[in-house]
Image: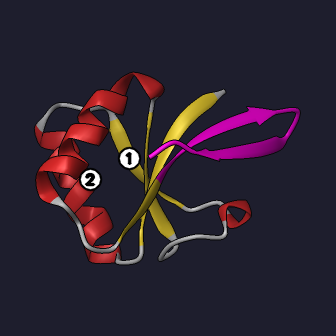
Amino acid sequence: MVYLLTAFRSRAHTLRFYDLLRSYKVNCRVVNTPKEAKVGCGISVKCGPEASGYVNLSLLKTGFPTFIGVFKVTEEGGKKNFLKIF
C-alpha cells in the first residue's frame, strides 16, 4: 500500500489543509501520524498518490508556516517506510 501523508506542526493548519483539499474534491482524511514518522503535531492528512498534484498546488498557493513535509509512505509486511518528497 502506498499513500501520502502531509504533516504540520499545527493541528489547526492540518485541519485547514484538509478542508482545502476537500474543497477540490480530493479523497483524503485526517489520521493520527504514525509514530515511526517522528514528526508533527500528532495528526496528518492522508491521501492517495494520485492527489500529489493537488497537494503540491495547495501548499504552494497557501504557504502554511507550520508545514513540515509531504511523505510517501509504503507499507510492506507490516513495516512502514517514509520518504520525504516535498
Q: Nearer the viewer, residue 63 or 79?
A: 63
Q: Nearer the viewer, residue 46 or 53?
A: 53
In the picture, measured across the screen, residue 77 lies left or right of residue 44, that is: right
What mark, if any, has residue 29 been given in the picture? 1
Q: Quadrant of residue 30?
A: bottom left
Q: Position of residue 23 (x, y in %)?
A: 11, 41
SS at circle 2? helix
Image vertical order of residue 41 relative to residue 61, above or below:
below
Residue at the image point whose x is 13% and y is 34% from the top: 24
Q: Position of residue 37 (x, y in %)?
A: 66, 61
- The amino acid at mark 2 is Tyr
SS at circle 1? strand
Give neighbour class at mark 1: few <14, some 14-19, many 20+ (Cα, 10 Å): some
Residue at the image point whose x is 54% and y is 34% from the top: 3
Does residue 84 belong to the magenta stretch?
Answer: yes
> How did the renderer colour the structure?
secondary structure
The region drawn magenta spans 70-86
Residue at the image point whose x is 74% and y is 43% from the top: 81
- Sequence-first tag of 1 and 2: 2
**Mark 1–mark 2 contact, CB under 8 Å?**
yes
In the picture, measured across the screen, residue 17 lies left or right of residue 2, that is: left
Residue at the image point whose x is 85% and y is 40% from the top: 78
Which quadrant does the N terminus fall into? top right
How would you classify the magenta stretch by its main secondary structure?
strand
Q: Which residue is the site of mark 2?
A: 18
Residue with the most extreme top position: 50
Q: Position of residue 32 (x, y in %)?
A: 54, 63
- The amino acid at mark 1 is Arg
What mark, if any, has residue 49 been given in the picture? none
Q: Nearer the viewer, residue 33 or 73?
A: 73
Q: Position of residue 66 (x, y in %)?
A: 33, 74
Image vertical order of residue 53 relative to residue 80, above or below:
above
